[in-house]
Image (tube, grey):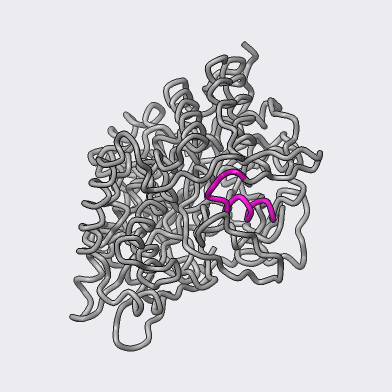
């Protein structure tokens, strides 16, 4: 077996949720988002600790230069911004409530925290609605588009090796990103007009597409996230030791209601990035025009269309994914699966990846309990048939929103019999407890135990105020240190932050 | 690896049409009944004024 040198794929998901304030007058989505988060923070948390922006540099570019005309994401430091005891960050971003999961050490664990994020939003929504006058209601959706041309993101993050040339990542992740939507897409009705004029992709059948997000991508590679969105985002802000790591920031994905899809999305992308770290990759499968190919694949629910590659080949999206899967199988044999969290999770991801590709090729409808877009398609077909509706009927558009509705009384996705990866007990635990296997453990436990002595926290440090001395910053530059194994008993033993800092040698 | 190869090469997709929802054959009746139950439930929880709900659902762009 070759020695794997790939960096362990620490993963996380940040989701911007859709928010609707149902009331008689006008409503302000920023105020509504603040209300949601404040209701949770004030209702469920004893201490409130703010996010620390000291180290944030979202304008730094992985290609090694700062584009002067690029629009760096704006940090809105004045808005509500909290750190939770499970290690997550919960804040208002632009005009949406956003929750970033804590750092997780494998795809399965991250599914649990993604589902815990939904639970936190549900509790927030209920707490906020208790405070609103009769007749008003805040409604949260886990989706990526309002159907009117406005999109908001569900971003993934993966730890990668700083020494890997970024051009290698771009070459090998691009074909994967263009085609992974066939098992990652959340599905939507219709097409949304982009900012630039371009040839619309053609629907293979009904006006329904596989991805919520494909309409909104206009560039191959770039730094932006709100305009001219790129398939490969170059934000270079590792929130860790910059000499050793990059954080691969992925903006192409949909927010999934299906846990199987979140699991596959994180698991397969972790595998491919580990392969890229180890330079164990297929011949480049670069689409001739990646942005057009992305939309073409999204609109092709028949999965029969051919993607034209730069080298002249023409392959179906499934065939491109089979190439990656076969390389990943070989990679597992030659390098092992430690980089993605070990054999159990790694082999399970490989087997599910294979089963879902086989299902897509033989009978996509057989995946209705696993893939959001297939579940939707089956539901909408049945609903349209029963009520004699055309595909442009607003009732179908309402279904397409309500599928993502987080209100338990209204959620359609929760009535679809979607297969689970997590258990309810795990999710309940993850609402308040951090993952034991990353530095989020240290962050979460400290907040829980010494919250009144913590001034601020962010991904890679925490600032303590123990009263007598100047503020003390504890750096956390290694995402896999500060775990339960490392500091569990230390945290159990320390009575206050002063003792903790003393024993940490800080 | 042989088994996987077989799975992969088995489907000449160009000549097939997308799988229809109302497929006939074994299990189709059961599937249809299951879908009918689901549709009954969906009818019960669907927003009452769908057109209004969709019209009012406007989000600011994010990220």
Q: Residue at x 43, y 47 (%)?
A: B20
Q: Residue furthest top?
A: A1
Q: Which residues are magenta?
A: A292-304
Along the line of sight, the residue nearer the viewer: A161 or A96:
A96
Magenta stretch prevailing secondary structure: helix
Q: Residue at x 62, y 27 (%)?
A: A6
Q: Residue furthest bottom?
A: A25
The image position of residue A193, as x and y in percent, is: 60, 71
The image position of residue A305, as x and y in percent, is: 63, 46
Q: Is residue A2 above or below residue A300?
A: above
Q: Residue at x 34, y 48 (%)?
A: A447
Query: Position of A308 compared to A137: left or right?
Result: right
Residue B49 lies within the magenta run: no
Q: Is residue A47 above or below residue A316?
A: below
Along the line of sight, the residue nearer the viewer: A62 or A373:
A373
Query: Position of A390 compared to A175: left or right?
Result: left
The image position of residue A199, as x and y in percent, is: 70, 65
Along the line of sight, the residue nearer the viewer: A410 or A169:
A410
Q: Residue at x 41, y 53 (%)?
A: A377
């Amino acid at each position: 077996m070759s020695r794997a040198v790939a960096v362990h794929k620490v993963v996380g998901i940040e989701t911007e949720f859709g928010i609707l304030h149902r009331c008689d007058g006008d409503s302000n989505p920023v105020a509504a988002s603040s209300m949601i988060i404040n209701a949770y923070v004030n209702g469920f948390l004893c201490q409130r600790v703010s996010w620390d922006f000291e180290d944030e540099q979202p304008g730094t570019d992985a290609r090694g230069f700062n584009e002067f005309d690029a629009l760096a994401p704006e940090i809105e430091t004045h808005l509500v911004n909290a750190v939770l005891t499970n290690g997550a960050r919960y804040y208002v971003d632009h005009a949406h409530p956003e929750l970033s999961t804590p750092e997780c050490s494998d795809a399965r664990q991250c599914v649990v925290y993604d589902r815990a994020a939904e639970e936190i939003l549900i509790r927030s929504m209920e707490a906020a609605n208790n405070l609103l006058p009769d007749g008003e209601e805040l409604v949260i959706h886990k989706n990526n588009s309002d159907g009117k041309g406005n999109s908001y993101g569900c971003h993934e993050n993966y730890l990668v090796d700083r020494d890997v040339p970024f051009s290698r990542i771009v070459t090998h992740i691009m074909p994967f990103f263009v085609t992974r939507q066939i098992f990652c897409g959340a599905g939507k009705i219709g097409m949304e007009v982009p900012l630039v004029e371009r040839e619309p992709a053609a629907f293979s059948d009904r006006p329904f597409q596989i991805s919520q997000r494909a309409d909104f991508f206009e560039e191959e590679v770039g730094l932006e996230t709100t305009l001219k969105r790129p398939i490969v985002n170059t934000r270079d802000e590792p929130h860790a030791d910059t000499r050793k790591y990059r954080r691969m920031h992925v903006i192409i994905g949909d927010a999934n209601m299906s846990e199987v899809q979140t699991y596959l999305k994180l698991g397969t992308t972790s595998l491919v990035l580990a392969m890229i770290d180890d330079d164990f990759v297929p011949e480049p499968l670069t689409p001739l025009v990646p942005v057009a190919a992305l939309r073409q694949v999204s609109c092709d629910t028949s999965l029969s269309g051919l993607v034209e590659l730069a080298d002249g080949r023409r392959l179906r999206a499934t065939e491109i994914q089979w190439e990656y899967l076969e390389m990943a199988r070989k990679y597992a044999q030659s390098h092992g699966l430690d980089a993605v969290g070990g054999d159990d999770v790694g082999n399970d991801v490989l087997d599910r990846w294979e089963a879902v590709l086989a299902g897509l090729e033989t009978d996509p409808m057989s995946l209705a309990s696993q893939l959001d877009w297939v579940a939707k398609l089956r539901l909408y077909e049945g609903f349209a048939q029963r009520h004699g509706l055309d595909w442009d009927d607003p009732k179908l558009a309402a279904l397409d929103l309500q599928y993502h509705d987080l209100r338990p009384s209204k959620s359609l996705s929760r009535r679809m019999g979607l297969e689970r990866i997590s258990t309810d007990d795990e999710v309940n635990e993850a609402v308040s407890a951090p993952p034991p296997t990353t530095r989020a453990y240290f962050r979460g436990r400290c907040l829980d135990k010494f919250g009144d002595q913590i001034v601020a926290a962010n991904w890679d440090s925490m600032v303590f105020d123990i009263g007598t001395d100047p503020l003390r910053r504890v750096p956390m530059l290694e995402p896999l240190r500060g775990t339960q194994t490392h500091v569990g008993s230390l945290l159990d033993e320390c009575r206050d932050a002063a003792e903790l800092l003393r024993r940490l040698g800080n | 690896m042989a088994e996987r190869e077989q799975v992969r090469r088995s489907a000449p997709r160009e000549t097939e049409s997308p799988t229809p929802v109302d497929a006939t054959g074994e299990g189709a009746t059961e599937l249809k009944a299951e879908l009918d139950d689901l549709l009954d439930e969906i009818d019960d929880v669907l927003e009452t004024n769908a057109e209004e709900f969709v019209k009012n659902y406007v989000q600011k762009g994010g990220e």
